[in-house]
Amino acid sequence: MPSPDPTPEPETAPATEPAPGGANVAEQLVRLTRRMQRAQKRRMAQLDLAFTPAQSRLLRVVAHYGDAPPRMADLAARLEVVPRAVTTLVDALEAQGAVCRVPDPANRRVVRVELTGTGRATLDALRSARRSAAEDVLAPLSAQQRDTLGGLLATLVDREGPHR
């Protein structure tokens, strides 16, 4: 009778099957988003930009309004947050010189938020950091793969949803 082998065979991990439906894709998108955020954060640190993601988003939203500065209530609605949260963000950005509060010429009780020159320069730097981060993350893809991915993402982003 053969003696038992004293070295047990290594255990193999069970094969992982892709999650049913879109769960695997959803997980990959979450992981990719985190990777993009980390890459963007590194780029921002290299540029010595100390803005939170929420502050960066507020700058983008204010810029979206162009020459018609938004009211605080407009910002809260667009960001889908309570007005107090916008006040906190505007306070911080105003302290950094990126935005300023201006009275509404038609209604002195209304306060509007404008980008300053510093805010525009900061927004340009933030956009540059985002583009560089995207280039880092997308580097392994060919131009054709990037075009395909861009088309697929555009389909998902442009689709009407409950929060548009």
Image: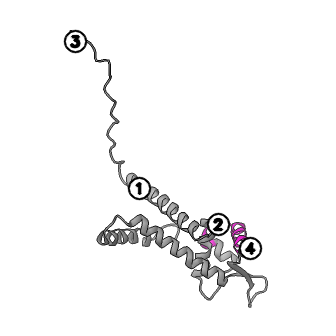
Tell me how far mark 1 sits from mark 4, CA to CA. Answer: 38 Å
Q: Secondary structure at mark 4?
A: helix
In the visual, does 61 lie left or right of 133? Answer: right
Q: Which residue is mark 1?
A: 28
Q: Main secondary structure of the magenta part?
A: helix
| Mark in front: 1 vs 2 | 1
Furthest residue toward bottom:
105
Q: Which circle marks residue 1 in the picture?
A: none
Q: Which percent across, then down, holds residue 48?
A: 61, 69
* Element marked by disc 1: helix
Residue drawn at 65 percent across, 84 percent down: 117
Q: Tell me which corner region of the image, top left, top right, bottom left or bottom right, holds residue 103.
A: bottom right
Q: How is the image coloured?
A: one colour
The amino acid on which the numbered mark 3 sits, given as a three-letter code, is Pro
User: Which comes before the other along the chain, label 3 or label 1?
Assistant: 3
- Residue that appears at 74% across and 90% down: 106
The type of residue carrying mark 2 is: Val
According to the image, label 4 marks what residue? 95
Circle 2 or circle 3, nearest the eye: 3
- The answer to which of marks 1 and 4 sits earlier in the sequence is 1
Disc on the earlier residue, 4 or 2: 2
Label 2, residues with CA under 10 Å away: few <14, some 14-19, many ≥20: few
Which residue in the protein does label 2 denote? Answer: 81
Magenta part of the protein: which range? 77-93
Q: In the picture shown, does residue 92 fall above or below 18?
A: below
Where is residue 1? Give x, y as percent. 21, 9
